Image (cartoon, rainbow, N blue to C red):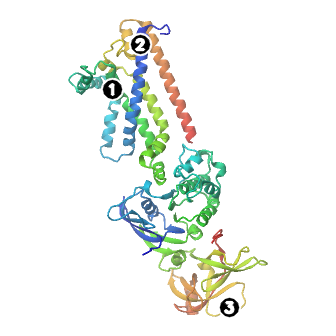
Amino acid sequence: MFGIPNEIWVPIRLTIELATITTLSLLVVATPLAWWLARSKAWFKEAAATIVSLPMVLPPTVLGFYLLIVLGPDGPGGAIASLWGARTLAFTFTGLVIGSIISSLPFVVQPIRNAFAAVGDRPLEVAATLRTSPSRAFWTVALPLASPGLLTGAVLGFAHTVGEFGVILMIGGNIPGRTRVMSTAIFDFAETMRWREANLLAGGMVVFAFAVILTMILLEKRFTRAGA
Amino acid sequence: MNAPLAIRAKFQGTIGKFALDAGFTAPARGVTALFGPSGCGKTTVLRCLAGLLRVNGVCEIDGEVWQDESGAFLPTYKRPLGYVFQEASLFQHLSVRRNLLFGAPRDNHDGTNGGIDFDEVVDLLGITRLLDRSPRNLSGGERQRVAIGRALLSQPKLLLMDEPLSALDRATKNEILPFLERLRDHLNLPVVYITHDIAEVERLADQMVLMDKGHVIGAGPLEELQSDPSLPLAAARDAAVSLEGVVQASDEAYALLTLSVRGGLLTVPAPVAPVGERRRIRVIASDVSLTREAPGPSSILNVLPARIVSMKPVDLNEIIAVVALGADGAGARMLSRLTRKASEALGLEEGTNVYAQVKAVALAPGRGELG
């Protein structure tokens, strides 16, 4: 497509698909989790927050190793895969999505949690005194007020998924057309001394990373100005 | 069987290290001031009334049970109340108009159900030109007015206000006070109003709940508490009583009003007003002196026969005397602050008939245009 050879184009397409699906899934998973972490008074809250943050500190290979076991034929992932006649979730695109969600979770949960915490009790109390049920207050007050945090979380989740390498390699296996994404494709091109292709993808990643960070800074600036 | 409409509240509990044990009953009409020093638990009581805080107790408004001792507890969002916080707390992501309509019943934007009308509130609060602005671009006073309007438009049966003026400077306060007075006079809505500023109480309140250290130490009509020597109000340096007077005559040439209060007539410097209208006046304890005999010609306009009801020393050298107007001592009560030396020289004691000389009587501003 666009004159770009398939072996470059397909990893790019897969990466964008993976990051998009992962980011959307993350927003659905991370938002209620962040809400709970920001507002709950449960004693085990910080322990739960620590578990969510583990992927930030653990080597991706450790995470990938455990995911491989969980998603493999003898783990719960294999049981789930058997529902549609497959043997395993490892080395599949679905497996990549699951792995990416877990490894990017802390990058999405943290900014959303901070945003909910910054909203504070007061707007929700005000909403309650205006005959607004807690669930309606979440949608009409908390979520709109925390939207800068959601946006930051989404951008970070997307970028982190695009940049993930270790986990992807462990559970995806770098299968062309199925689980070979940009980061693993670069590794592959470099291994086989195809510097031109590696350069093309790596350079693209640099430009992408630059654009993401710049966008974040500009968005943050705009929100802070609007909030002042 | 027809109990008068009332706010009945009783809350007991410990919040952190603060022990609250406060109960009161107040008529569910007019403005009830919740008054006391900072940290005495006023806000806690108001939050309990709203259901924002849950401790054991009873909360009953107009016979509607919001909380009782059997464990019934109506969550805040099901209570027909309005709450104005110390800081306006407007929704920053919504325009002024959408803030105002946030809690408004969706089928009643035009107020046709006999509720509080949008245009009326916007007009009353003087925020018509702000409607399409963002709350970010409003001044502190404007924000607080919008917050009041937002609470009113949710069509509450009870309005709770937590020191709505305390975060504002003196000039902004004076800009909002007239709006509050208009609200009180134009809308038939009971208000519980927290303040630690006695001037706001004297200006706005009809009745008062006096709090100290988590307890209610007095509740009742304003002038009753003001003239109760067992309460800290009467002993304060700026002690005063607020009296309701009815205009009897106007003296246009001297710009004086003659008002009748229970047990006497008072002449007050004030613009002309129709006979029969009500005016609130304020008499400061240190402006009232007592004599045993009717004084001769004097520059003091108001000299009223009265009887001493009680005397109580406030410090080493001063005494606060409560006098009831009228030779029979059946009229309205006033406070007089005098030295112990003068009191002994005149032989004053409880039951003594005296003349109260009132050096100054002030009209409480803006009160009671509609009576």
Residue type, numbered disc 1: Ile
Judged from the image, the secondary structure of the residue bearing numbered disc 1 is helix
Residue that mark 1 sits on: A98
B351 vs B23, left or right, is right
Judged from the image, the secondary structure of the residue bearing numbered disc 2 is helix
Chain letter of disc 1 in the image: A
Q: CA distance from mark 1 to mark 2?
A: 20 Å
Q: Comparing marks 3 and 2, which lies closer to the viewer?
A: 2
Contact between marks 1 and 2 (CB within 8 A): the answer is no
Residue that mark 3 sits on: B295
Q: Nearer the viewer, residue B10 or B275?
A: B275
Inspect this view and state whether residue A107 appears: no
Chain letter of disc 3 in the image: B
Q: Residue at x 53, y 74 (%)?
A: B222
Judged from the image, the secondary structure of the residue bearing numbered disc 3 is loop
Q: Residue B94 location, x and y as percent?
A: 55, 44
Residue type, numbered disc 2: Val
- Quarter of the figure with residue B23: bottom left
Q: Quadrant of the N terminus of chain B?
A: bottom left
Residue type, numbered disc 3: Pro
Say which label, 1 or 2, has the lower sequence index: 2
